[in-house]
Amino acid sequence: MLRRIEPDSTEPVARRVFRELRHAIVTMQFQPGQPLSEQEVAGQLGVSRQPVREAFIKLSESGLVVIRPQRGTFVVKISAKQVMDARFVREAVELAVARKAGEGLPPRAVAELEANLKAQREAATSTNPASFLELDEAFHRTIALGVDCEYAWRVVEETKAQMDRVRYLSLPQATPLDRLIAQHEQIVEGIRARCPDAAEAAMRLHLREILNSLPELARRFPDLFDSESSPAEPIAESA
């Protein structure tokens, strides 16, 4: 069930609608292949149809929905190729960010990362993967903003929509949370030690985790994936 959009004069309604719908798609509240109705979505969110229409367009640009004239708007199935393309771009950007963080991250940002890790350990005991994903998102965002790479983070955000659905599906069976937390800890250790090579290597290992989970998930949930874009077997790559 979508959360109603409460009045807020500080942010455009369409942007908030987009964020709510993106979250619903990533967390599988809206399933791949499912049709979306402007009128129904507007009713659930308590907004007019115009911001919903604008959000649908932005979701289409993000590759999460397809708008078919005279037929409607549909959540797209997961494309393994698009996931891999997004991973490639994200790795290129975030490895550079991690190296910069390894050269020096403000103490305030390091403290935020440590607090985030503590919250991750607590979230790992819950049954709500979405709460862990929110912390994971905040972890990576904190590193990027801590080294004044806000634009780089916006690029990552706009690129990784397809990845986020796979990451949600992978938790916790295909990708154990303890493994992800340990990888995050290694990133922080590299940053704290002011070792760019260690921070970059830890980030590379972490971002390549999806190479192992994607083929398994495609086999387990074939109806959620685009049949014309089949993932390869897990790829062993060194850090």
Image (tube, rainbow, N blue to C red):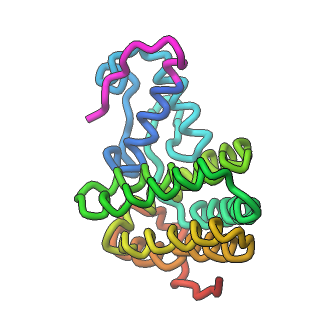
Q: Quadrant of residue 38?
A: top left
Measured as percent of width and height from the top left, residue 22 is found at 46, 40
* Residue 81 on image: x %, y %: 60, 66
Q: Residue at x 59, y 47 (%)?
A: 108
The foreground one among 143 and 107 is 107
Q: Please indicate whether residue 35 sits to the left or right of residue 84 in the image.
A: left
Closer to the camera, 106 or 53? 106
Horizontal arrangement in the rendering, residue 6 relative to residue 104 (left or right): left
Q: Is residue 13 magenta?
A: yes
The residue shown at (72%, 72%) is 195
Q: Quadrant of the C terminus?
A: bottom right
- Report the quarter where the N terminus lies: top left
- Verify whether residue 36 appears in magenta: no
The magenta region covers: 1-14
Q: Which SS type dominates the magenta stretch? A: loop
Q: Establish if 120 lies above or below 64.
A: below
Q: Nearer the viewer, residue 78 or 110?
A: 110
Image: 21 above or below 91: above
Q: Residue at x 51, y 49 (%)?
A: 138
Question: Residue 15: where, in percent of width, then height?
Answer: 53, 26
Q: Position of residue 78 (x, y in %)?
A: 48, 58
Up/down of 92 relative to 105, above or below: below
Horizontal side of residue 190 vs 74, given as left or right: right
Residue at the far front: name it: 107
Q: Nearer the viewer, residue 48 or 121?
A: 121
In the displayed structure image, the side of residue 39 where residue 104 appears, left or right? right
Circle count = 0
129 up-or-down from 14: above or below: below
